[in-house]
Each structure stands twice: as C-alpha cells, then as structure tokens.
C-alpha cells in the first residue's frame, strides 16, 4: 500500500466520527427560528463588515471604485447573509 493510501486508512475512524455529526439545519429553518431576532442568526453582523467599510472609506484606494461615483456602478456581494454589505454599497452609490 502506497503512502497516500496508508494515510487514508489511518483517517478512516475520523471520517466515521464526522459522519455521525448531525448536519446543521437548513438556512430557511435558521431564519424561521430567528423570527424578528436577527442577532440569533449565526452569520448576522447587523452591520457591514469592518474591512469593507475600511476599503470604501480609504482615500488611498488604488483603483477606480464605482461606489465613489454619483452615477453608480455595479457590485455583487457573495454570501451576503442579511445584506448589510449590499445595503451599504447601495447607500453609497445613490448619494
């Protein structure tokens, strides 16, 4: 048995233990449980990410940031969660 396959054989018990861990509830269920208490959503920050704010506020941004222009631009927020970052981008574009 090669080194790679021997390593897999040693990890088999860990894989079996992982298989026994219950899956997290679906996103829809998490939102339903939260109701009006959005702070109970695990990924909710309830504010834009601080690094996004730093980037948007930086006077030394080396590129042409569309969020700085009154005529707007387009942005896509991946994994937007509750949309705090998307709302901040929209607010800045429509000033």
Image (spheres, rainbow, N blue to C red):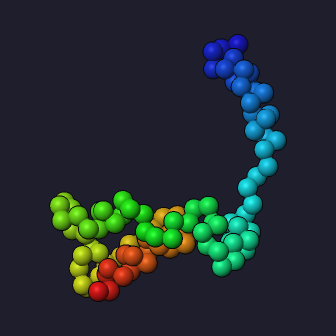
Depth order, front residue of 75/24: 24
Q: Quadrant of residue 60?
A: bottom left
Who's the residue at 36% across and 82% down the image?
Answer: 91
Give how far across and how far down residue 16 sits, in percent: 80, 34
Query: Which part of the image, by quadrant, shows the N terminus?
Result: top right
Query: Which part of the image, by quadrant, shows the C terminus?
Result: bottom left
Q: Residue furthest top?
A: 1
Q: Quadrant of residue 68?
A: bottom left
Who's the residue at 79% across and 35% down the image?
Answer: 17
Q: Say if 17 sits above or below 45 in the image.
A: above
Who's the residue at 31% across and 81% down the image?
Answer: 93
Give how far across and how far down residue 3 sits, in percent: 63, 15
Who's the residue at 51% across and 65% down the image?
Answer: 45
Give left or right: position of 71 versus 78. left
Give left or right: position of 22 versus 68. right
Q: Say if 8 sits above or below 83 in the image.
A: above
Q: Is residue 39 visible?
A: yes
Give how far across and how far down residue 54 sits, in percent: 30, 62
Q: Is residue 63 visible?
A: no
Count of numbered tags: 0
Q: Quadrant of residue 29?
A: bottom right
Give how far across and how far down residue 14 sits, in percent: 74, 30
Q: Say if 3 sits above or below 90 in the image.
A: above
Depth order, front residue of 72/53: 53
């Amino acid at each position: 048995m090669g080194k790679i396959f021997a390593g897999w054989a040693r990890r088999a018990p860990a894989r079996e233990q992982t298989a026994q861990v219950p899956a997290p509830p679906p996103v829809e269920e998490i939102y339903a449980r939260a109701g009006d208490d959005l702070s109970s959503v695990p990924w909710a920050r309830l504010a834009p990410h601080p690094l996004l704010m730093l980037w948007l506020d930086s006077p030394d941004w080396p590129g042409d940031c569309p969020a700085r222009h009154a005529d707007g631009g387009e942005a896509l927020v991946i994994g937007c969660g509750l949309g705090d970052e998307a709302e901040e981008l929209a607010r800045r574009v429509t000033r």
